[in-house]
């Protein structure tokens, strides 16, 4: 892969992201005919659509970055943000908060805070359980993640049976992943800052991320400190995922597929892979949100996570079949 | 000078050490011993990859564990027995990772690529290479990382290589040692070990049986009880002596080594 071509591909991805972002703002329901309209929204819609566009871009980028870091840290091409148990932990946190407010009569503190707490607990637990000699071990971490995720899932189902339907509200659609059009005022700056810091940091340590792919002995020999690098990667990925899950619920397949698509475009070296994957993730989520907007015309009932999974799953299978070795790392 | 003191590992199934040894600049140490005698364990501990318990590894008097990552990478380069081959990284990228913590040196990277004749495959993914080619790439990484006085710790570096590349690698390692470096290398083939080594560390069951000049250590009466096989020196056509096992497999080994050429 010549680096010149890779740079052009990154520029192309950026252009595609801009186009999809514009589409997201312009596509909507025509209030007169009720059909599809493509125009600059009037002031009553503008803020909603801008918010959804920005949230989609940031969340897609954050999930893709988390997936890239996880696939490097765990030396596993199938690693994705769901592997740390973050999504299930967040879901359990939400259900637990709903249940406690139902039992105690105290109003629920909304979804974001319990989701963050649940996600955080799950990540810490997985990191503690996945340790070997003080540092995260790829295989143990993956196993711990799968077990924690399954247990949180079971707990979630249990609580669903205990919380009355009316209280659950739109939990099901949150659990499949939606892009909200209204968010707390602090959410966007916080998410944007975390993504920006994570992106800059990942590009700065891209050499060490490359070295994580090596065997332990070689990585130690060149001074890549694989243990601590791995731990920081997992923590950063956990934070990125927790914030996105709290905001949008678990959006499937973005964190898994985006790094693979980016790898096909710009190669496996992280200096270009990281920004390319972030752009792919933003493109995928915003694109899916545009498609959702076209399908359900702004009624907002269709969870975007359904679309990313429906589109991402077959696409990943196609990559697997076509790419052969390329899907491995 | 490289020195290790009281390296020790206790596990349920395996006890290693305590082991102390040292080597002066300019020497090649061959680490020999039967299967499961602890050669790889010793090399991993010497390279700081495996924790050494109470023991300590010192390079010119300085504990290796106390060095920062850049100093460490410059002092010592390690090649494990089975370096990762399932890498999508390109050959060039892997070689350049040798300089991850060190001053950027495009010349050193280019030199390493040239020495190991990787120019034609520099943009290929390591995963697409043969075992021998991949080993050359990893050796080139070590070569790019190496400074003149570095300690190179290599675990059976020539195992996947063909005869020409084995000879080439031994010549390169000899030149590194003569230039003031140290090479600590495990070798399965005792004849090769006797040929390339200056010092030999003989291990058995996780203990150092004897350490000393190769001419004293690699002798039939010393190694026979450890390996449980018979050895003898044969004289080759050029007059040099070559160690062969005189057990049932002697004939096969003979024919392989007699075609080896002199060094």
Image (cartoon, rainbow, N blue to C red):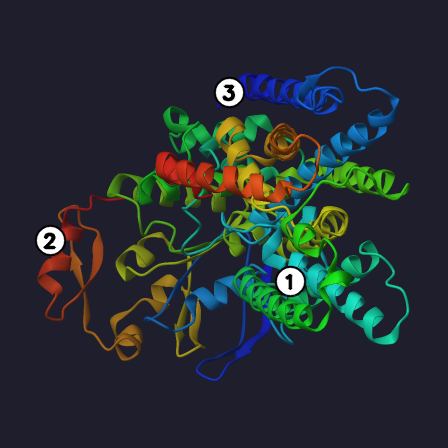
Tag 3 subunit = A
Q: Image check: B43 left or right of A156?
A: left
Q: Nearer the viewer, mark 3 or mark 1?
A: 3
Q: Residues within 10 Å of mark 1 (few under 14, many from 20)?
A: some
> Farthest residue toward the front?
A33
Tag 1 subunit = B
Q: Is residue B68 visible?
A: no
Q: Which residue is nearer to you in this view: A6 or A306?
A: A306
Rendered-image quadrant of the N terminus of chain B? bottom right
Rendered-image quadrant of the C terminus of chain B? top left
Q: How far is mark 3 from mark 1, CA to CA?
A: 43 Å
* Secondary structure category for the residue under label 3: loop
Disc 2 target residue: B255
Disc 3 target residue: A2
Q: Position of residue B14 (x, y in %)?
A: 45, 80
* Residue at x 28% of width, y 59% of height: B189
Tag 2 subunit = B
* Secondary structure category for the residue under label 1: strand
């Amino acid at each position: 892969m010549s680096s010149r071509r890779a740079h052009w591909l990154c520029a192309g991805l950026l252009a595609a992201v801009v186009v999809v972002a514009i589409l997201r703002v312009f596509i909507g329901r025509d209030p007169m005919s009720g059909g599809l309209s493509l125009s600059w929204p009037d002031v009553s819609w503008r803020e909603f659509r801008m918010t959804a566009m920005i949230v989609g871009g940031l969340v897609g980028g954050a999930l893709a970055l988390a997936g890239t870091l996880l696939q490097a840290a765990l030396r596993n091409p199938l690693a994705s943000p769901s592997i740390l148990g973050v999504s299930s932990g967040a879901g359990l946190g939400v259900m637990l908060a709903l249940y406690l407010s139902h039992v105690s009569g105290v109003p629920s503190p909304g979804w974001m805070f319990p989701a963050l707490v649940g996600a955080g607990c799950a990540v810490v637990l997985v990191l503690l359980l996945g340790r070997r000699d003080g540092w995260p071990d790829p295989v143990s971490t993956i196993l711990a993640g799968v077990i924690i995720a399954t247990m949180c899932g079971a707990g979630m189902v249990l609580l669903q049976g205990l919380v009355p339907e009316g209280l659950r509200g739109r939990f099901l659609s949150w659990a499949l992943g939606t892009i909200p059009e209204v968010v707390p005022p602090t959410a966007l700056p916080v998410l944007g800052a975390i993504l920006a810091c994570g992106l800059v940091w990942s590009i700065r340590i891209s050499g060490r991320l490359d070295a994580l792919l090596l065997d332990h002995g070689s990585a130690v020999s060149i001074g890549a400190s694989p243990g601590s690098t791995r731990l920081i990667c997992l923590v950063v990925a956990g934070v990125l995922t927790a914030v996105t899950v709290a905001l949008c619920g678990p959006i499937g397949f973005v964190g898994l597929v985006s790094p693979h698509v980016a790898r096909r475009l710009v190669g496996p070296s992280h200096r270009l892979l990281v920004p390319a994957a972030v752009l792919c993730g933003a493109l995928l989520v915003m694109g899916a949100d545009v498609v959702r907007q076209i399908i359900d015309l702004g009624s907002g009932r269709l969870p975007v996570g359904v679309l990313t999974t429906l589109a991402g799953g077959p696409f990943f299978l196609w990559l697997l079949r076509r790419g052969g070795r390329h899907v491995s790392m | 000078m490289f020195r290790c003191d009281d390296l020790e590992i206790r596990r349920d199934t395996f006890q290693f050490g305590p082991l102390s040894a040292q080597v002066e600049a300019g020497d090649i140490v061959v680490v020999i011993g039967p299967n499961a005698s602890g050669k790889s364990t010793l090399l991993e501990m010497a390279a700081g990859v495996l924790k050494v318990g109470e023991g300590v590894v010192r390079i010119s008097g300085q504990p290796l564990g106390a060095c920062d990552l850049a100093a460490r990478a410059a002092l010592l380069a390690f090649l494990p027995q089975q370096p990762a081959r399932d890498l999508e990284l390109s050959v060039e990228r892997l070689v350049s990772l040798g300089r991850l913590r060190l001053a950027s040196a495009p010349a050193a990277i280019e030199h390493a690529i040239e020495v190991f004749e990787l120019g034609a495959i520099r943009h290929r993914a390591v995963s697409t290479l043969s075992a021998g080619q991949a080993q050359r790439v990893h050796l080139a990484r070590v070569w790019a990382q190496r400074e003149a006085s570095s300690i190179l710790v290599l675990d059976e570096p020539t195992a996947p290589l063909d005869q020409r590349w084995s000879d080439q690698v031994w010549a390169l390692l000899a030149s590194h040692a003569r230039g003031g470096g140290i090479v600590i290398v495990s070798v399965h083939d005792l004849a090769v070990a006797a040929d390339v080594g200056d010092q030999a560390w003989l291990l058995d069951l996780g203990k150092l049986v004897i350490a000393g000049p190769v001419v004293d250590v690699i002798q039939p009466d010393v190694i026979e009880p450890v390996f449980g096989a018979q050895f003898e020196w044969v004289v080759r056509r050029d007059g040099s002596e070559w160690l062969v096992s005189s057990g049932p497999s002697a004939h096969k080994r003979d024919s392989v080594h007699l075609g080896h050429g002199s060094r």
